[in-house]
């Protein structure tokens, strides 16, 4: 028996035995596979993403040992300096096209075959000679590969007939420099203005063409001579210990480990051992939790919405944690993981809440560098949350739950620091800040409860408390149009709640169900005895069958009203089961007596049911029948009340109303005892007060 189960348990469909079909089994397998696939898909698999390196700060994670040999890479600044040094010897390649100079000189001579305008023929020869000299010196298409033009030490490689020779970069011209050198020549400078009119730049084109392919190859050969690493870390070598300050050398060692891990992971495009290990790890945890449900919580296992809630919570928190770790966002402690057991505890029970919480914590811990710390802190927080949520009866309780959970997590985190550190000044205060933020986020549990109820069809204690408000439209209307039924419902609720406390059922649930179990009577209240007054009985004008149908209709009418007012299924079940598949006996017996020789269809006098399938529904059926019958007792003695209670409940047992619900003979006996004691209190006989005798008048 589950003594701490929530109202959710009573929303389940009745079953004569626990069994699932092949289709249902396939759905469950699909849920498990989908859950495992999503969790594993988002899990980070390279170690560089599981911690954050902070130079000049203590190492906050567990001791780190090299799992493989890896080079100790130089820093980017060091490599850049070495590259700059090596590139000082870099010589870009240019190919000399000697025919270009000859063709351009020939073109000049042909263009001005008839002489230069305004100049003597001597200038023509001088210009041709100077052009030939410029082409011999070399005219490049660009000096950009040579670097800084002012650098007098830069050299280049000029390829002539497959032979490369070095040449100073300052000894060659660009097209613009060649033109300037031509018109500023000493022999031509005096006639510069006339020369500028000749468009001599048309005859100056590059004859040294940059060979990009050969130059880049030469440049890369120089860079390849620079070693990327300054040493090698051996497998098994201690990289850093927890609490050690991350200095420059250790920082480079850690960065090298990260870089090598990324390289190894990127180079392996196939499914590796790590992937299969994660898959097996998550699968074992999810399957273990599912086996727990199938063995100890069959009602959850057979109810797909409950499985949907469990696996959704596993996926949600596992994926969020993986994303935080993968992208180095904040800290995993900011996740309100304790929210998962809060939801499960509110809707279900403590043991299942703890089991689910452990599964989530173990999955999340597998992607962290400090798994033990996380497990200790979050398990403590989850236990505190479950303990404080034994009963959720008010909004303020969530405040105390969040506060208690946060304090418990912070205390455990502080305890771990004291165990692992010899200097409390090294404590990372940011972790405590993240735990406080997670505690604040727990306040979101309250609005999320409503969403969970709508998505998965659950009912929380807060919802039951709200439904018990006498100002609810249905209850207010009942008190107005069917006051007798209203008082009957309140009385039944009180009786049923007392029984529930005694037999380990849910008092709040059964009391709320009792308030609504007869709401169908508000449609035709006068047809029910408790609402009749003045001796008027409309059944006198109806046949026994019609009267029975009118009485039975309060169940179907009640369900219609429940649908109209969006009452949860857990309340609808009380409406449909409080008479089970019993008969409207008064009219059934009366018809039998009036028609002894006729056959009749018993279904005309039978309630639609079903019979109770939860302990709370059975308790309500007993309390309802006994309370209604007790009003007809001629006198209220202990014996008459005991006989009434015994007769009614024994009849219900013998007719099989409780065969499909988890109630024991011991529970039934306790129920009888509570009902007898409560009815004796309700209908106790008042003692007669003596009258004061008049004093005799003395004569």
Image (spheres, grey):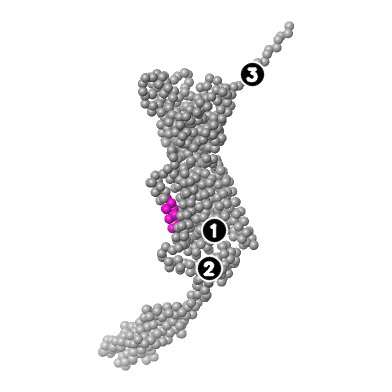
Nearest the eye: 128 or 595: 595
Q: Is residue 73 above or below residue 289?
A: below
The quadrant of the rendering that contains the C terminus is top right
Q: Is residue 611 above or below residue 290?
A: above
Disc marking residue 371? 1
Judging by the rendered image, the residue that carries numbered circle 3 is: 689
Residue that sits furthest to the top in the current view: 699
User: Which residue occupies 53% across, 46% down?
Assistant: 351
Q: Which is more foreground, mark 2 or mark 3?
A: 2
Nearest the eye: 140 or 214: 214
Judging by the rendered image, the residue that carries numbered circle 2 is: 66
User: Which residue occupies 56% across, 68% down?
Assistant: 238
Circle 2 — which element? loop
User: Which residue occupies 39% across, 82% down?
Assistant: 93
Residue 324, given in percent of the width and then of the height, sits at 49, 58
Residues under numbered marks 1 and 3 in contact, where contact means CB atoms less than 8 Å apart:
no
User: In terms of image quadrants, where is residue 125?
Assistant: bottom left
Residues under numbered marks 2 and 1 in contact, where contact means CB atoms less than 8 Å apart:
no
Specify whether 136 is left or right of 40. Answer: left
Q: Is residue 374 above or below residue 147?
A: above
Residue 273, given in percent of the width and then of the height, sits at 45, 63
Instruction: Decide whether the magenta segment is chiefly helix, strand or loop.
Output: helix
Q: Give the residues drawn in magenta, as a range.
A: 31-43
Q: CA distance from mark 2 to mark 1?
A: 18 Å
User: Which residue occupies 36% across, 21% down?
Assistant: 598
Specify whether 165 is left or right of 627. Answer: left
Mark positioned earlier in the residue sequence (1 or 3) = 1
Circle 1 — which element? helix
Mark positioned earlier in the residue sequence (2 or 1) = 2
Q: CA distance from mark 1 to mark 3?
A: 76 Å
Question: Residue 572: in sight, yes or no?
Answer: yes
């Amino acid at each position: 028996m589950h003594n701490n189960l929530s109202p959710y348990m009573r929303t389940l469909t009745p079953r004569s035995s626990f069994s699932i079909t092949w289709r249902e089994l396939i759905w469950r397998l699909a849920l498990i596979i989908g859950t495992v696939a999503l969790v594993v898909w988002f899990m980070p698999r390279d170690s560089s993403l599981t911690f954050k390196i902070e130079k000049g700060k203590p190492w906050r994670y567990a001791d780190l040992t090299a799992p493989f040999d890896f080079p100790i890479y130089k820093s980017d600044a060091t490599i850049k300096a070495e590259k700059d040094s090596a590139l000082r010897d870099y010589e870009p390649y240019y190919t000399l096209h000697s025919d270009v100079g000859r063709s351009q000189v020939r073109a000049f001579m042909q263009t001005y075959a008839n002489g230069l305008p305004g100049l003597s023929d001597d200038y023509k020869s001088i210009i041709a000679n100077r052009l030939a000299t410029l082409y011999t010196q070399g005219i490049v298409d660009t000096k950009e590969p040579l670097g800084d033009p002012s650098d007098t030490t830069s050299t280049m490689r000029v390829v002539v007939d497959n032979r490369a020779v070095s040449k100073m970069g300052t000894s060659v011209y660009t097209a613009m420099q060649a033109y300037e050198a031509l018109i500023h020549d000493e022999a031509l400078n005096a006639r510069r203005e006339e020369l500028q009119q000749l468009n001599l730049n048309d005859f100056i084109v590059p004859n040294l063409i940059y060979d990009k392919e050969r130059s880049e190859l030469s440049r890369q050969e120089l860079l390849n001579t620079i070693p990327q690493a300054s040493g090698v870390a051996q497998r098994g070598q201690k990289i850093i210990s927890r609490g050690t300050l991350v200095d420059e050398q250790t920082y480079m060692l850690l960065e090298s480990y990260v870089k090598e891990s990324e390289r190894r992971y990127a180079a392996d495009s196939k499914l590796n051992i790590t992937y299969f290990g994660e898959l097996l790890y998550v699968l074992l945890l999810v399957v273990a939790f599912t086996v727990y449900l199938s063995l100890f919580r069959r009602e959850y296992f057979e109810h797909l919405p409950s499985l949907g809630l469990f696996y959704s919570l596993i996926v949600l928190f596992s994926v969020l944690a993986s994303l935080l770790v993968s992208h180095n966002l904040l800290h995993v402690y900011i996740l309100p993981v304790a929210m998962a057991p809060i939801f499960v505890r509110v809707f279900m029970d403590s043991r299942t809440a703890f089991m689910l919480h452990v599964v989530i914590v173990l999955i999340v811990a597998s992607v962290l560098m400090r798994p033990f710390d996380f497990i200790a802190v979050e398990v403590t927080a989850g236990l505190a949350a479950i303990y404080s949520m034994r009963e959720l009866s008010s909004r303020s309780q969530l405040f105390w739950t969040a506060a208690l959970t946060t304090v418990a997590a912070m205390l455990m985190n502080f305890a771990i620091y004291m165990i692992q550190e010899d200097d409390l000044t090294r404590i990372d205060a940011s972790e405590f800040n993240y735990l406080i933020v997670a505690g604040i986020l727990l306040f979101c549990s309250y609005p999320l409860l409503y969403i969970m109820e709508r998505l998965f069809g659950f009912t929380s204690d807060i919802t039951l408390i709200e439904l018990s408000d006498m100002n609810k439209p249905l209850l207010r209307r009942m008190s107005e149009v069917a006051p007798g039924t209203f008082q009957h419902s309140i009385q039944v609720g009180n009786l049923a709640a007392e029984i529930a406390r005694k037999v380990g059922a849910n008092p709040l649930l059964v009391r709320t169900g009792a308030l609504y179990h007869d709401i169908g009577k508000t449609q035709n209240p006068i047809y029910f005895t408790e609402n009749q007054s003045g001796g008027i009985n409309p059944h006198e004008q109806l046949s026994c069958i019609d009267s029975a149908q009118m009485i039975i209709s309060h169940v179907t009418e009640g369900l219609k009203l429940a649908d109209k007012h969006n009452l949860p299924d857990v309340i609808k079940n009380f409406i449909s089961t409080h008479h089970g598949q019993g008969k409207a006996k008064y009219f059934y017996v009366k018809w039998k007596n009036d028609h002894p020789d006729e056959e009749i269809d018993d279904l005309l006098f039978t309630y639609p049911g079903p019979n109770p399938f939860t302990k709370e529904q059975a308790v309500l059926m007993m309390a309802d029948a006994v309370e209604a019958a007790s009003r007809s007792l001629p006198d209220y003695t202990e014996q008459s009340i005991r006989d009434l209670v015994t007769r009614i409940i024994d009849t219900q047992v013998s007719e099989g109303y409780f065969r499909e619900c988890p109630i024991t003979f011991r529970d039934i006996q306790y129920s009888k005892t509570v009902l007898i004691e409560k009815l004796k209190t309700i209908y106790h006989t008042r003692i007669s007060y003596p009258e004061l005798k008049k004093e005799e008048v003395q004569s």
